[in-house]
């Protein structure tokens, strides 16, 4: 929802083709936050209507069929891990001055100039929004083209379109150091095919270099659930893990498909499910 509001603002800016003045605001935070709060209230109402109990607190899996929520034990036939992820930042000198894709939605004013680090769809979307709104954008990434893993023709077309829009694209480049000048500007030391160089941006430095699973403190390893080197839950295509009663969100699509075909093996039918999901702290939903 917040991203959609920002995209709409960018589209309106392009349609109107009007000049922006310094300090133009992004979509009002009050309206945006009200929309998000409204959506949350709708989701909570739907949970209540479907007899789902919402328990707020820090969740920890303490057994194959048991979750502890701040001292309260809840048991279920299956435990669904749906904790989402959070932005990941690399180890770079000066990284404390950067914001992430989460911080983008906390901006109170539109920056005049920004460096966006990354080339995934989040980085490209945010860079495109800001460029369309009139911000001068530097997009910095390691690969030769944006959107690694996507269709080659699409990547080349996007690269050409971003450059044609006026965006300054720094491909095959790595940020080695971030140095503030004390006046709200940042110097980024880059290494790339043309050697070392420095670009300077005003006030805003945005990293969108990937996300990390939000599972610290859930106790998954203690009950036998495997994690890979990046901290993600090791699971099969159907969401199954090394512990049969613990599944990941990949199982949701399988469950929906099986339910549509009346397959009684659907993991979401005829059973209790505790789902661990993120919030201010972890939340658990009990589905009777």
Image: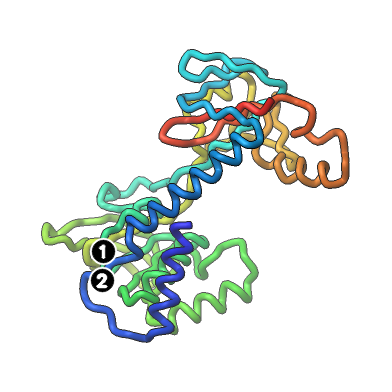
Q: Tell me, yes or no, whether the two marked residues, 1 and 2, touch with CB atoms within 8 Å.
A: yes
Label 1, label 2: how many angstroms apart (C-alpha)? Answer: 6 Å
In the rendered structure, which disc, 1 or 2, sits on the residue that comes first in sequence? 2
140 relative to 199 in the view: left or right = right
Labelled disc at residue 209:
none
Q: Where is residue 224 in the image (x, y as percent from the top left)?
A: 64, 21
Specify the quadrant that holds the C terminus. top right
Is residue 104 shown to the viewer in this render?
A: no
Q: Residue furthest left?
A: 182
The residue under the point 48% across, 60% down is 122
Residue 180 to residue 274: above or below: below
Q: Where is residue 238 in the image (x, y as percent from the top left)?
A: 75, 40
**Front-lying residue, 166 or 171:** 166
**Front-lying residue, 89 or 245:** 245
The residue under the point 61% across, 74% down is 154
Q: Position of residue 182 (x, y in %)?
A: 11, 57
180 relative to 192 in the view: left or right = left
Q: Name the residue under label 1.
A: 109
The residue under the point 48% across, 57% down is 1
Residue 1 to residue 63: above or below: below
Q: Name the residue under label 2.
A: 24
How many C-alpha atoms fall within 10 Å of the one at disc 1: few (<14), some, or many (≥20)?
Answer: few
């Amino acid at each position: 929802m917040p991203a959609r509001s920002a995209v709409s603002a960018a589209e309106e800016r392009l349609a109107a083709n009007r000049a922006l003045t310094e300090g133009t605001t992004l979509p009002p935070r009050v309206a945006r936050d009200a929309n998000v709060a409204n959506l949350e209230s709708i989701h909570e109402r739907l949970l209540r209507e479907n007899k789902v109990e919402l328990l707020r607190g820090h969740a920890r899996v303490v057994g194959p069929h048991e979750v502890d929520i701040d001292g309260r034990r809840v048991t279920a036939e299956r435990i669904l891990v749906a904790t989402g992820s959070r932005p990941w930042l690399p180890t770079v000198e000066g990284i404390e001055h950067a914001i992430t894709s989460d911080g983008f939605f906390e901006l109170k004013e539109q920056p005049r100039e920004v460096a966006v680090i990354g080339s995934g769809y989040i980085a490209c979307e945010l860079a495109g929004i800001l460029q369309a709104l009139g911000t001068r954008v530097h997009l910095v990434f390691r690969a030769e083209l944006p959107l690694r893993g996507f269709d080659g023709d699409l990547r080349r077309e996007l690269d050409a379109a971003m450059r044609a829009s006026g965006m300054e694209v720094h491909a095959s480049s790595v940020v080695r150091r971030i140095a503030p000048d004390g006046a709200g500007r940042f110097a980024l030391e880059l290494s790339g095919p043309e050697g070392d160089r420095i670009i300077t941006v005003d006030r805003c430095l945005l990293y969108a270099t990937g996300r990390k699973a939000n599972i610290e403190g859930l106790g998954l390893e203690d009950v036998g659930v495997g994690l890979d080197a990046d901290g993600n839950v090791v699971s099969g295509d159907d969401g199954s893990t090394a512990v049969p009663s613990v599944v990941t969100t990949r199982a949701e699509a399988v469950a929906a498909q099986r339910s549509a075909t009346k397959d009684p093996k659907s993991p979401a039918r005829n059973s209790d499910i505790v789902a661990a999901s993120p919030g201010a702290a972890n939340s658990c939903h009990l589905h009777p």
